[in-house]
Image (cartoon, rainbow, N blue to C red):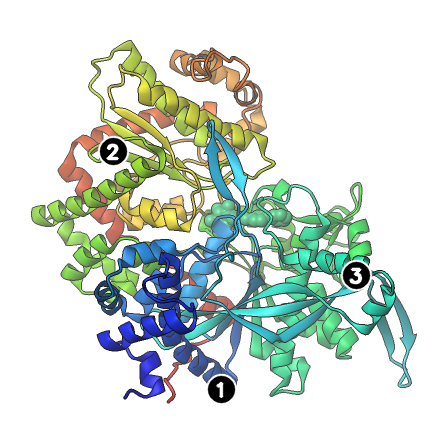
């Protein structure tokens, strides 16, 4: 007889098999003979979860006892990707579980594929938050993630007739074995109404906020296990529930229908993720979401703090909050409100706490992408916060005036309130004023921040600024997604690199080793074969694994210039049409990415890619030498298939516009070479891998700026480049649109007239550079050496390095080692 603990935490073959069958019976209520694949997935997931919980509980107990300084990562998005495979890797039981599953007559790959990924983010920013949670747990840093439990995550993308169609993401449909609901952890969150003030018996001025309605935040926890450590941190996501208070009932007497309708309105707050990665228009529901999760999280932190510490004036010594962009920036005003109105701290003490609690990460340089909310909306939804923001602003501007006597321009730019037309609250300004640290996400990005969008704040508070170059977790992005490469590397240098990525440097000498190159090439080829099979299964398109896999996967955006990639494809196509016997490096162009549903031009870019593919893939002159594939529904799961199979990584944004990029890092880690501009983290990747192992093209940021300043005329470039003109004309002729000459006009006239993203200026440089890529690929030995060196030199881009930088320079937190209890 096995004890309960052994039974639920043991990892012997027999214990695992028994646990899976127990969970199938007692949690899914199924016999094996009637169980579906999903039932088995659930049974296996609960088996793995049991083995997490022991660590999770020990971690929570240790943090409580030690009262260690803790990081809270506030983010409106956490793009986690599937849990099962990752937890198997981090627990170190992948092998044992695979055996147990086999002996039960099941297939581990099938079970892994059963998981519906939690797509609680749009792209880079949300995925960065997920990598950071993995690294914080692996580095044993006391930390919480705080965010929103969206019932519907990022939409599923289907392609119909070449166009994007959005389908609701019902990820919770069959249950989520990885979350633990905490119905007893509930935070009231107020909205609307009015404020009034009075003076209390001790002569203190007090404000009361009589809200229009209250919503409750209910906690749902997901354990985040580190790699081969006992630390399992918490991601706490909030779900909105209606409160049925006495008032609520009374208010709705005789109006049962109305009461239920109001309940639905409250619960709308956490229904759906906004699928835009830019604040297109200031929507009330979006601000509600931001305030809802900021308030719930801060109240939760104060509750935890007060369990051991009565004195809130030292709150910032126990907690630090990282604001992932301005989406949680309302937290600055909310912490002030909680401290002053609810906990009766005086303003100066509260401001000292607030200002020493928050740190702000900026992720964008586009001025139009800076979040701002109309004053009227604020007044209506968060009347008390507007008062607090006015007060913060007045005191802040008084300080600024001392700095700039008699000058009104810097004041107008620094003010939290934009008064140039309709009045707005500028969230980036609120975040800067309320934070002790401000950072960009790549070296170039931070420099541009200091020089442009946050220049005035840099002048005022230079000591607050620093760079923290992004990173990605090698656990998910190499070990989990690329087991072949992982095995090959570990055979040579051991497995220390998984937690210390700089050790990949030991691979460098092997770049010259003929046998190792061959093994490296074989691994890549195997991954390409697997991707080719997936492509055929999903799209019916047959691609050749011996061709160069040229891949661009990321959100569809004009500034990311997927259409520049298409111009290259059409250029090659035309060369083949001119000379069908042309000796050309066979290529497979693979695209993936979602467009914001309201972003017409991005959707037209998808249609252009699929339309060009339809013609090129079928043209007998091409004879299979070029293939163009748009893979629908790019997400974390698909990313895990695609990075390991790439030869060439497309990182071709207009210089100065991509804050960092993180896909660029995932590709290089897996041995792809990059064709890219000097933008975002590309600059640092090229520095690390060496200019000779990176395909650079295009204008630099200063060149883009200079060209813009002198008056950019795309026409100059088109007129003087017959090849370019032919490419544009071929699209315009309807060649890719069944003769329809109007379809792509919006895209084409954008390029002819303003060409905001300088495609025409960068076209020839890109084409020439691609020609070098094609040549380099012909020299297989040389290509393999470059590929090995790319991986070997990627140590810097582990998110472990990023997190260590944050810990040392900003958070001032240190590891806490967790011992297992019991
Ligand atoms: C804001 C307000 C209203 C609605 C939506 C939004 C919103 C949502 C998501 C605004 C921006 C985002 C996401 C931005 C994002 O993903 N930025 C990327 O962040 C990465 C991580 O730092 C960088 O690598 C990328 O360069 C940057 O584009």
Q: Which residue is mark 1?
A: 66
User: Where residue 161 appears, x then y in whole percent?
Assistant: 47, 27
Q: Inspect this view and state whether residue 447 appears.
A: no
x then y, percent, for residue 768? 32, 25
Which of labels 1 and 3 is toward the front? Answer: 3
* Helix, strand or loop for disc 3: helix
Dot 1 and dot 3 residues touching (CB under 8 Å)? no
Can residue 442 be seen here? The reply is yes
Q: Is residue 577 above or below residue 148?
A: above
Query: How would you rate the neighbour count of disc 3 (Cα within 10 Å): few for under 14, some for 14-19, many for 20 or more?
Result: some
Label 2: which secondary element: strand
Is label 2 or label 3 in front? 3
Residue where numbered disc 3 is placed: 259
Q: Residue at x 31, y 35 (%)?
A: 550
Q: Which mark is residue 548?
A: 2
Residue 536 picture location, percent across and down: 30, 35
Instruction: Give the side of residue 504 with respect to residue 251, left or right.
Output: left
The mark nearer the N terminus, 2 or 1, is 1
């Amino acid at each position: 007889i096995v004890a309960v603990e052994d039974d639920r935490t043991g990892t012997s073959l027999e214990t695992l098999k028994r646990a899976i069958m127990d969970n199938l019976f007692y949690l899914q209520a199924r016999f094996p003979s009637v169980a579906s694949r999903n039932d088995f997935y659930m049974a296996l997931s609960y088996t793995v979860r049991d083995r997490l919980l022991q660590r999770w509980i020990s971690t929570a107990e240790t943090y409580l006892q030690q009262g260690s300084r803790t990081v809270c990562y506030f983010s409106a998005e956490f793009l986690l990707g599937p849990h099962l495979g990752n937890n198997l890797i981090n627990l170190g039981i992948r092998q044992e579980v695979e055996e147990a599953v086999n002996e039960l007559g099941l297939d581990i790959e099938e079970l892994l594929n059963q998981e519906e990924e939690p797509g609680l983010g749009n792209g880079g920013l949300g995925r960065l938050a997920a990598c950071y949670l993995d690294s914080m747990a692996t580095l044993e840093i006391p930390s919480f993630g705080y965010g929103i439990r969206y019932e519907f995550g990022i939409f599923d993308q289907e392609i119909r007739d070449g166009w994007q169609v959005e389908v609701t993401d019902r990820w919770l449909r069959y249950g989520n074995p990885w979350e633990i609901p905490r119905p007893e952890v509930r935070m009231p969150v107020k909205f609307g109404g009015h404020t009034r003030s009075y003076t209390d018996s001790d002569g203190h001025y007090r404000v009361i906020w009589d809200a229009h309605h209250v919503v409750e935040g209910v906690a749902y926890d997901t354990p985040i296990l580190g790699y081969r450590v006992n630390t399992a941190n918490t991601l706490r996501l909030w779900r909105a529930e209606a409160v049925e208070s006495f008032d609520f009932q009374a208010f709705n007497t005789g109006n049962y229908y109305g009461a239920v309708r109001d309940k639905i309105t409250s619960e709308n707050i956490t229904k759906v993720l906004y699928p835009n990665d830019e604040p297109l228009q200031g929507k009330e529901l979006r601000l509600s979401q931001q305030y809802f999760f900021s308030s719930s999280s801060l109240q939760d932190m104060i509750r935890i703090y007060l369990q051991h510490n009565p004195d809130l004036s030292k709150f910032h010594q126990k907690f630090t909050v990282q604001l992932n962009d301005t989406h949680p920036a309302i937290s600055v005003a909310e912490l002030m409100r909680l401290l002053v109105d609810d906990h009766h701290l005086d303003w100066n003490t509260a401001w000292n706490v607030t200002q020493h609690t928050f740190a702000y990460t900026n992720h964008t340089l586009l001025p139009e992408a800076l979040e701002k909310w109309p004053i009227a909306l604020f007044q209506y939804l968060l009347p008390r916060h507007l008062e607090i923001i006015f007060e913060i602003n007045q005191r802040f501007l008084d300080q600024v005036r001392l700095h700039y006597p008699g000058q009104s321009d810097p004041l107008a730019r620094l003010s939290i309130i934009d008064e140039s037309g309709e009045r707005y609250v500028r969230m980036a300004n609120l975040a800067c004023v309320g934070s002790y640290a401000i950072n960009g996400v790549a070296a170039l990005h931070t420099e541009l921040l200091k020089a442009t969008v946050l220049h005035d704040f840099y002048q005022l508070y230079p000591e607050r600024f620093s760079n923290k170059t992004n990173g990605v977790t090698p656990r998910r992005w190499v070990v989990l997604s690329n087991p072949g490469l992982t095995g090959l590397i570990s055979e040579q240098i051991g497995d220390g690199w998984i937690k210390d990525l700089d050790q990949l440097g030991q691979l460098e000498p092997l770049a010259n080793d003929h046998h190792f190159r061959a093994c490296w090439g074989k691994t890549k080829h195997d991954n390409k074969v697997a991707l080719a099979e997936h492509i055929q299964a999903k799209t019916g398109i047959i691609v050749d694994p011996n061709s160069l896999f040229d891949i661009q996967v990321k959100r569809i955006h004009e500034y990311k210039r997927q259409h520049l990639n298409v111009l290259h494809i059409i250029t090659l196509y035309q060369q083949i049409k001119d000379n069908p016997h042309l000796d050309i490096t066979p290529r497979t162009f693979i695209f993936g990415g979602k467009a914001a549903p309201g972003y017409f031009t991005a959707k037209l870019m998808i249609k252009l890619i699929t339309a060009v593919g339809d013609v090129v893939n079928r043209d007998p002159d091409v004879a299979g030498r070029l293939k163009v594939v748009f893979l629908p529904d790019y997400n974390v799961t698909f990313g895990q298939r695609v990075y390991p199979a790439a030869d060439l990584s497309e990182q071709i944004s207009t210089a100065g516009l991509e804050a960092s990029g993180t896909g660029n890092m995932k590709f290089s880690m897996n041995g792809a070479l990059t064709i890219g501009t000097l933008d975002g983290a590309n600059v640092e990747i090229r520095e690390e891998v060496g200019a000779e192992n990176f395909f650079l093209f295009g204008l630099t940021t200063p060149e883009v700026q200079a060209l813009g300043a002198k008056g950019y005329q795309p026409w100059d470039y088109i007129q003087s480049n017959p090849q370019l003109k032919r490419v544009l004309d071929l699209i315009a002729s309807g060649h890719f649109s069944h003769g329809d000459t109007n379809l792509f006009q919006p895209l084409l006239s954008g390029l002819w007239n303003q060409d905001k993203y300088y495609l025409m200026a960068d076209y020839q440089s890109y084409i020439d550079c691609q020609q070098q890529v094609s040549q380099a690929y012909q020299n297989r030995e040389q290509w393999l050496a470059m590929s090995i060196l790319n991986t070997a030199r990627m140590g810097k881009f582990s998110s472990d390095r990023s997190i260590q930088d944050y810990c040392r320079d900003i958070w001032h937190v240190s590891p806490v080692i967790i011992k297992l209890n019991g």
